[in-house]
Image (cartoon, coloured by chain):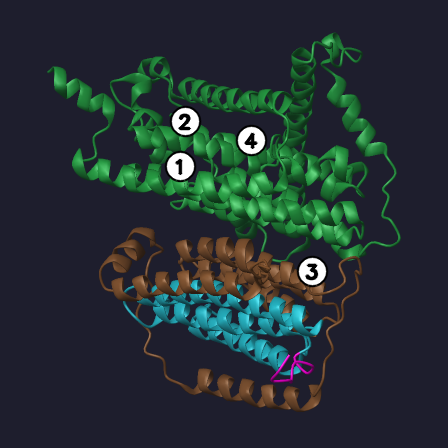
Chain colours: A green, B brown, C cyan
Amino acid sequence: MQFAIQWLVDKFSFLSPISILLLISLMFIVGTVVLLLAMLYEGLGTYALRKIGGDIQVRIGPNRVGPVGLLQFLADGVKLFLKEDIVPTVVDKKLFILAPFITFAASCAAFVALSYSDRLVISNLNIGLFYLLAISSLVVIGVIMAGWASNSKWSLLGGMRAAAQIVSYEIPIGLSLLSVILITQSLNMGEIIRSQSGGWGILNWHIFHNPFVFISFFIYFTAALAEVNQTPFDLPETESELVAGYFTEYSGMRFGFFFMAEWGEIFIVSAIAVTLFLGGWQLPIINNLDIHIYLKNLLQLGVFLGKTFLLIYLMLWIRWTLPRLRVDQIMYMCWKVLLPFAFFNIIGTGLWLLIFKGKGIPELVIQLFS
Amino acid sequence: MEGIIYKIVFYLFAVLTVGSALVVVTSRNIVHSAFALLFTFFGVAGLYVFLSADFLAATQVLIYVGGILVLILFGVMLTRKVFDVKIFSGAGQVFPAAVGVAVIFFLLATVIVKTPWHLVGERAMEPTTAEIGKLLMTDFLLPFEVASVVLLAALVGAVILIRKEVRPPKVD
Amino acid sequence: MIIGLEHYLFISAILFSLGLFGVLTRRNAVSILMGIELILNAANLNFVAFSRFVTIGISGQLFAVFVIILAAAEAAVALAIILALYQNIKSVSVDEADAMKG
């Protein structure tokens, strides 16, 4: 991208109409591709959500459009696009229009820092993980903005609940990730994944490094469920009490943006869990394959996506299984259960690294027997 | 290094920062100024990236946007009638304040232009996270500890200030 | 023109002036807090710019980190005070909070 722009500027002197036109069209194309991919993923995600929901509740789920209802998402997407764009008269217009874009942009911006395979990294940030945490905190602003601007009590209550919940649960998330950072001593997503390679296959994954990290993973996953407003923590959008929470007043594509942002968030938190705890794009079989580098990277991408989708599946499973908590229970859970355990894990991991000189359980066991 | 794109993006961030700061202090709607603050913080974070302070940029977004701005928004929404979108903040003494601020700004501008700065050479952009961590644990250990005590004190203080007074039940 | 120290200092000076203007003219306590945040950001920008262009090492960035920490503490306490004020006098206008006894 950067090179393309620089090349354009060198080729046609800057600010000539043709370079501006090309630049704008380039941005437009990239934007369209990103948007299409996001919509495809979101559509298939929704389809999976409904099918899994149907399965768990012994229903059939969508089965009308296309083979086994597979094209349902196209129909839904077209419906969203063709719906009338309603901006209620009593809303704060500027903020109402801005809110979905901020939420969506924040959730899109997170995707650049992920490491999808050994070579496929969009932006190799050396503060990758920290950037992800920071940029995902932007989402909450969009949510509050939507809740406020809608000028409706459902929206406002949903927005306030979402803000309180997301801000609170960011702390256990950060702390539970810290214990992995202690081991890797790097915030770069690629390096974190590479530090999990080695001779013992999946035992090299950080989740098996020591008991504290093992607990950290579950703390992270629980807190992540709350961060992305999934059941049992879906209080911001409880349809039985708040209609739809902060996006009650939104319809058509504006609602679609919130929806895509939510699915983007779900992907991001799962991908972070995969990267930090579950070995990222590594799978012992693929690591040892002697094949062309591009093919290998493609396989790694597949492994990464597979692991991520597995975690997303777990989330959907939980979503269709558990009832939701009360507001006070959610806050209790965050501040009095997850947070102390997360602190305990950091100290525990630190001590472990000090005592065993940075070695994990698999290494220690091997040492014991050799 | 300093291509034309670099400059354009720099000026974009500069305009974003200054423009939204202008909205923050002049908007008649306090919710609008609070949300404009988002763009100011974001713009400053962008400028940090230009100054090769990547860790600080992420910290800025995480703490200012994710923490302080949310606090401010809660403050705005909890101190007014909740379902009333238009919230005005009154402005008084605008003229003398404007004159005073303009004088201060020209003073600052003169200082900036007139001072012969001793610049050290251009340095390459390098990761700062590890360096900051090392300094926090060595040269800046005392400020670090004091800051954590301050945070704890602020936390306790804030809770005590806004908690509801619970009177012990009367015993007959 | 190469983007140098002066550019950042100018942005910071503008931010500082705007923040000061906000603090001086606003009557809503939360707005004043926003002005203070602008001033703190201006100071931070100065710290980081000087650490990049004038000094060797990154101690300026550490100063900025501490300023951010203090800003967080300050915002929490200030909002607690504002909420307490609102509970007592049902207003957050700093002009109306002029009584020593509630």
Residue A334 rendering spot, x and y as whole percentages: 50, 41
Residue neighbourhood size for the residue with mark 4, other residues' Cα within 10 Å, grouped as few (<14), some (14–19), many (≥20)? many
Write down the chain letter for disc 3.
B
Tag on residue A280? 2
Residue under numbered circle 1: A189
Residue neighbourhood size for the residue with mark 1, other residues' Cα within 10 Å, grouped as few (<14), some (14–19), many (≥20)? many
Write down the chain letter for disc 1.
A
Q: Are marks 1 and 4 in contact (CB under 8 Å)?
A: no
Asked whether residue B122 appears in the rendered view, the answer is: yes
Query: What residue is rendered at 64% in x and 59% in y?
Result: B73
- Element class at badge 4: helix
Q: Are marks 2 and 3 in contact (CB under 8 Å)?
A: no
For discs 1 and 4, the disc positioned in front in the rendered view: 4
For discs 3 and 1, the disc positioned in front in the rendered view: 3
- Element class at badge 1: helix
Write down the chain letter for disc 2.
A
Query: What residue is rendered at 41% in x and 69% in y?
Result: C49
- Element class at badge 2: loop
**In the image, are marks 2 and 3 on the same chain?**
no
Q: Are marks 2 and 1 in contact (CB under 8 Å)?
A: yes
Residue A309 rendering spot, x and y as whole percentages: 54, 22
Question: Real-space Cα distance between discs 3 and 1?
Answer: 38 Å
Residue under numbered circle 4: A267
Please check the rendered image and state whether residue B147 is part of the magenta-colored stretch, yes or no: no
Amino acid type for the residue under numbered disc 4: Phe
Write down the chain letter for disc 4.
A
Task: Using the image, determine if residue A68 lies above or below residue C84.
Answer: above
- Element class at badge 3: helix
Residue under numbered circle 3: B77
Residue B109 or residue A107, whichever sits in front: A107
Task: Using the image, determine if residue C47 lies above or below residue A234.
Answer: below
